[in-house]
Amino acid sequence: MVKYTIQRLLLAVVTAFIILTATFFLMKTLPFEKPVGTTEAIYAFYQNQVRLGYLVDLPSLDESMGECLWTFTDSAKVVHNFYQKSSAEQYAVWITGLLTRFNWGTSTFISPNVDAMVIIGERLPTTIKVNIWPALISVPLGIALGIWAALKKNKMTDHIISTVVMIFTSVPSFIVITLLMLWLCYQNRVLPSQWPSQNADAFTKFKGYIIPTLALSFGSICSYCRFTRAELTEVMSSDFLLLARTKGLTRSQAIVRHALKNAFVPILPSILAEIIGLLGGAMILEQLYGIPGVGRLYVTALNQKDYNVLMADMGFYTLIGLISGVFLDLSYGFIDPRIRMGARK
């Protein structure tokens, strides 16, 4: 397990390096977005980019450097001509800052000259708070429905649960969100149509969680229900469960002592991985409901062409995805000792 763990971690690091490198150079193929605001603010932004190592400040025009991004004459009559460095030079600066100082660059439009990871950190708590309640509801409810459907296999209860699960699985998440907002927010006006502000009262903030909780719970409940039903149904038809029944165990005893225990081996790692995945947020929901989380930040950075924040957000999602994958693979061995024994053989 130690050797396998090291291999998986090294593979995750290499994968992250490849994804982020490719993303960086693709970002640099996009045109440079010049900042807006007062002259002093624009000059401060360009000076900061020079200090970070992405731009160069020359006293005179130099055609060999490409297009001049901005020319400014300060109060001392000194001329500043700002040029971009080559993509390779910018990448060397960026990867060095990332590895030595965990510096992802600064924002250009969302919060000018503010570190991109600081912006993500400010929005991360909201994303976690919004996503934690659907997880607490969907995990027990989805597993309970899956167990119920498996125990009532091929009966009316199983057919009803499977049909409802199939319907909600087939409907895209943004359709569910839109219908909930249309019904509960605009037609009946029982819930706020947008995420409550920081100044709202406690009851209004509580009502603000209802739409995200319902919207995010449907898909997870259906997923857990289908997964649990499939695993438990397979275990209940296995030979070892038949042997347990022939030794005198009742059906309920065999299910509780043996079937559920073995069926949960692949289910528990997926639950643990989803808990880590909560940090990723729900991009569509946050955008439609106005939730100031990391998912909405990604869309905002893309629309405003704030490439440094977009790059940091992309790195954040990459990190969450890789950590979830590694944790999912390793958790199988910790939950089921037979997997560790098989690895030794």
Image (tube, rainbow, N blue to C red):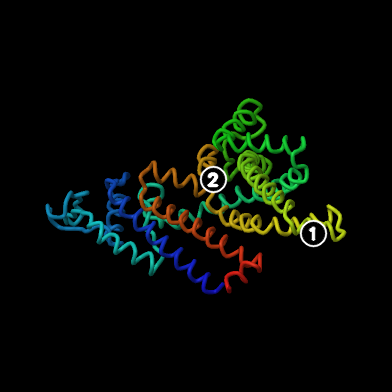
Q: Is residue 31 left or right of residue 223?
A: left
- Identify which residue, 45 or 330, lies in the foreground: 330
Q: Quadrant of the C terminus?
A: bottom right
Which residue is tagged 2? Answer: 282
**3D distance between C-alphas at marks 1 and 2:** 46 Å
| Type of amino acid at the residue the image marks with label 1 | Leu
Q: Residue at x 57, y 57 (%)?
A: 276
Secondary structure type for disc 1: helix
Foreground tag (1 vs 2): 1
Residue at x 42%, y 61% (from the top left corner): 15
Q: Nearer the viewer, residue 128 or 197?
A: 128
Where does residue 221 sit, x and y in percent of width and height? 66, 44
Pick the front one: 12 or 248: 248
Instruction: Name the residue: 63% across, 45% down.
Output: 223
User: SS class of the residue under badge 2?
Assistant: loop
Which residue type carries mark 2? Ala
Indicate left or right for 126 with 96 as reference. right
Closer to the chain start, of discs 1 and 2, is: 1
Pick the residue in front: 283 or 57: 283
Residue that badge 1 annotates:
243
Q: Position of residue 173 (x, y in %)?
A: 56, 38
